[in-house]
C-alpha cells in the first residue's frame, strides 16, 4: 500500500513536470496540428483534468473536510503561474486569461472522474 502511494505521487510529479515543460517551451518547439478554433482550450482543460485526477489519486484521503477545495485552488494557482511564466519568458508565448479559465474548468472533469473511478 505504501509503495503504491509513492508511485502515484511520483506519477503526479512527472505529469506536473510535463505540463511545466509544455507550458514554457517556445511554440516553435511544440508540434502543430490544425484542429478547430478553440481546440487549444479543450487541450488545456484536458491537461488540467488529468492533473486534478492524478492529484486526487495520489492523495486520496487527504483532500477531505476543510481541505476538499484545496485541489481546485491548486489547479487555479498552478495554471495561473504557468501563464505568467509564459508571459515572462519572452519565448513567443503570452499570458491568456482564457487559458487560465480553461485550466480551471479542467478541474471539474478531473474531480468527476476521480469520484467515478477511485474507490476511497
Image: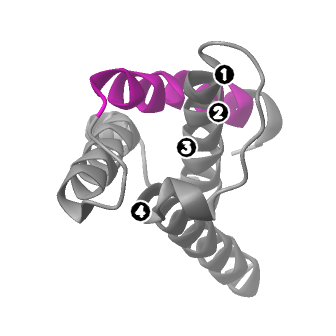
**How far apart are labels 2 and 3 at the CA level?**
14 Å
Q: Residue at x 25, y 58 (%)?
A: 85
The circle on residue 43 is: 2
List x then y, in percent, for residue 51.
Answer: 57, 49
Name the N-terminal-most of marks 4 and 1.
4
Task: Say which quadrant the N terminus sits in.
Answer: bottom right
Q: Which residues are magenta?
A: 96-115
**How far apart are labels 3 and 4 at the CA level?**
20 Å
Name the N-terminal-most of marks 2 and 4.
4
Q: Are marks 1 and 3 in contact (CB under 8 Å)?
A: no
Q: Is residue 37 left or right of residue 25?
A: right
Q: Is residue 48 left or right of residue 26?
A: right
Most foreground residue, 113 or 102? 102
Q: Are marks 1 and 2 in contact (CB under 8 Å)?
A: yes
Circle 3 Cα neighbour tier, 10 Å, few/some/many (<14 / 14–19 / ≥20): many
List x then y, in percent, for residue 104.
Answer: 41, 28
**How far apart are labels 4 and 1 at the CA level?**
19 Å
Most foreground residue, 2 or 40? 40
**How far apart are labels 2 and 4 at the CA level?**
15 Å
Taking the view exactly as shown, the residue that stands out farthest to the bottom is 3
User: Where does label 1 land, which residue?
Assistant: 39
User: Where does label 4 land, which residue?
Assistant: 24
**How far apart are labels 1 and 2 at the CA level?**
6 Å
* Circle nearer the viewer, 1 or 3: 1
* Circle nearer the viewer, 2 or 4: 4
Amino acid at each position: 500500500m505504501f509503495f503504491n502511494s509513492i508511485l502515484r505521487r511520483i506519477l503526479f510529479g512527472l505529469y506536473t513536470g510535463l505540463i511545466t515543460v509544455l507550458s514554457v517551451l517556445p511554440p516553435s518547439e511544440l508540434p502543430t496540428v490544425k484542429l478547430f478554433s478553440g481546440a487549444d482550450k479543450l487541450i488545456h482543460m484536458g491537461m488540467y483534468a488529468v492533473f486534478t485526477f492524478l492529484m486526487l489519486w495520489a492523495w486520496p484521503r487527504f483532500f477531505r473536510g476543510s481541505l476538499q477545495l484545496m485541489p481546485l485552488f491548486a489547479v487555479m494557482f498552478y495554471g495561473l503561474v504557468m501563464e505568467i511564466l509564459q508571459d515572462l519568458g519572452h519565448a513567443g508565448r503570452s499570458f491568456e486569461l482564457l487559458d487560465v479559465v480553461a485550466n480551471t474548468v479542467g478541474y471539474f472533469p478531473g474531480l468527476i472522474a476521480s469520484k467515478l473511478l477511485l474507490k476511497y
